[in-house]
Structures are given as structure tokens and as C-alpha cells.
Amino acid sequence: MQVALPSGDGPWPVLWLLPPMGCNHTRWSAHTDIEALAEKKHRMVVMPDLKLSCGLDMVHGLDFHSMLVTELPLFLREHFSVDLTSQVIAGAKEGAYAAVYAAAYGTQTYEQVIALSGGSLTDEGLLVDSDLRFRHAFGDKVSALVGSDYDIGIQIQEIQKHSVVYVAYGMEDSYRYSASRLGSKLPPWQVEVLDGTLGWNEWYKVLQKRV
């Protein structure tokens, strides 16, 4: 993982930033000014590498969900001055799914959950059984996951009992369908729909406004 710290003394509240699938822990800092965001918001920004896990305890792989919601918070508490009573979690595309999934099934409580260009992957027709990336994370029958525990859309009302959920997506995003379905379950002021396809610049602007 990478960490960006604000100046001054802690304890610092935490912003978790999760990358899209195929991007590692360096992508947020490579494409956006995360140090400036950490300074402005006076938050410790934590950017873990989720590999191809979609933030799950993978069916054919490692336990990335447990790492994110249990192991890394303990690591932060041991090595940094952090305030884990104030946490925000955000992610882009598959990282958006991971963020909402963490809020639904994790051991941490987040003040805000920010889904950028993504929603419940189980709503997307592109999760087909032949796609090994998703089979490793979800199992061999990814086309039959609607309504299962992997379907975070059915958890959104429960999540909103303890977290404010924001969804931002572009009208030409690859996951616009699932993002719109997730957004339809939220009050209008918690949804931002933009033109075109969103990328690092647009995601960063949303974070500047929302965090």
C-alpha cells in the first residue's frame, strides 16, 4: 500500500482509496495530487493494492476483504497515529464495488462511502462465466450472483443506516448501468451524473468536493 500523510500531528482520520482492477497501489498518487488532498482534508490517505480481487476474499485466491477491513486497520493503529472513528472509503470502477462491499460486510464503520464509476458488479452483463478475472474473485458461476451476498445493491439500505453513500458516474462509463442502479436507491443529492467517461481527473474532483 501507499500512504499520504498531512503535516502536523495526529491522530489523523483515514481516507481509503481503492483502485480499479488492474491498477495497483501506486495509481492514485501517479494520476492525482493525493498529497494535496491529504493536506487539505487533514486526512491520512491509505491506498492498498487489491490485485484482481474486487475487494473480496477470493474464491480462487487470497483474502483481500479481510486484509482491507481487519488486517490493515490493525496495522495502521500499530504504526501510525490514526483516528479510526473517522473513516471514509472510496473506490473507482471495481474499486467502487470493493468500497461498498467493505461497508456492507466489513468490521469497520465508515462515515462516507464513495462509489466512482461503479456499482454492484453483479448487475453487469459483462460478468460472464468465461472471464477468468471475475471467476477467480467470485467463483465459477459469476452469471448467477444476482441476489446473492455479492449483490451489494440489496445491502444499500442497511449500509445507509451508518454511512452516507455517494455515487458519481459518467454517461459513457463502462459500469454506468450498475452505477445508475445503485444511485437509484439513494436520495438525488447523493448521486452525481456527468457527461462522457470519467477518469482520474474527474474522480479526483469528486473526492475534493465530497470528502
Image (tube, rainbow, N blue to C red):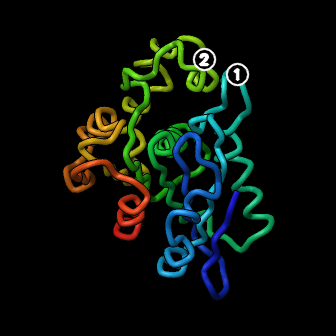
**Residue hosting label 2:** 139
Marks 2 and 1: in contact by CB < 8 Å?
Answer: yes
Check disc 1 and report its element: helix, strand or loop: loop
Q: Quick one: quadrant of the N terminus?
A: bottom right
Taking the image as shown, residue 26 lies to the left or right of residue 166, namely right
Of all residues shown, which one is farthest toward the bottom?
8
Q: Say above or below: 107 vs 5.
A: above
Q: Which of the two residues, 38 or 67, is positioned nearer the viewer here?
A: 38
Q: Say above or below: 18 vs 102.
A: below
Amino acid residing under circle 2: Gly
Q: Answer with the quarter of the image where residue 43 lies.
A: bottom right
Check disc 2 and report its element: helix, strand or loop: loop
Q: Which mark is residue 208?
A: none
- Crowd tier of the residue under label 1, counting other residues whose Cα lies within 10 Å: few below 14, some 14–19, many 20 or above: some
Q: Which of the two residues, 23 or 138, is positioned nearer the viewer here?
A: 23
Residue at 62 percent across and 69 percent down: it is 83
Q: Earlier in the sequence, mark 1 or mark 2?
A: 1
Residue at 38 percent across and 38 percent down: it is 119
Question: What percent of the width, then of the height, locates residue 51?
Answer: 66, 40
Q: Answer with the quarter of the image where residue 209 lies.
A: bottom left
- Crowd tier of the residue under label 2, counting other residues whose Cα lies within 10 Å: few below 14, some 14–19, many 20 or above: some
Amino acid residing under circle 1: His
Q: Quick one: quadrant of the C terminus?
A: bottom left
Residue at 64 percent across and 43 percent down: it is 50
**Residue hosting label 1:** 60
Of all residues shown, which one is farthest toward the right?
78
Q: Answer with the quarter of the image where residue 62 lies.
A: top right
Question: What percent of the width, then of the height, locates residue 15?
Answer: 54, 63
**Gap between marks 1 and 2, in whole Å?**
7 Å
Q: Say above or below: 37 vs 177.
A: below
Q: Which of the two residues, 117 or 198, is positioned nearer the viewer here?
A: 198
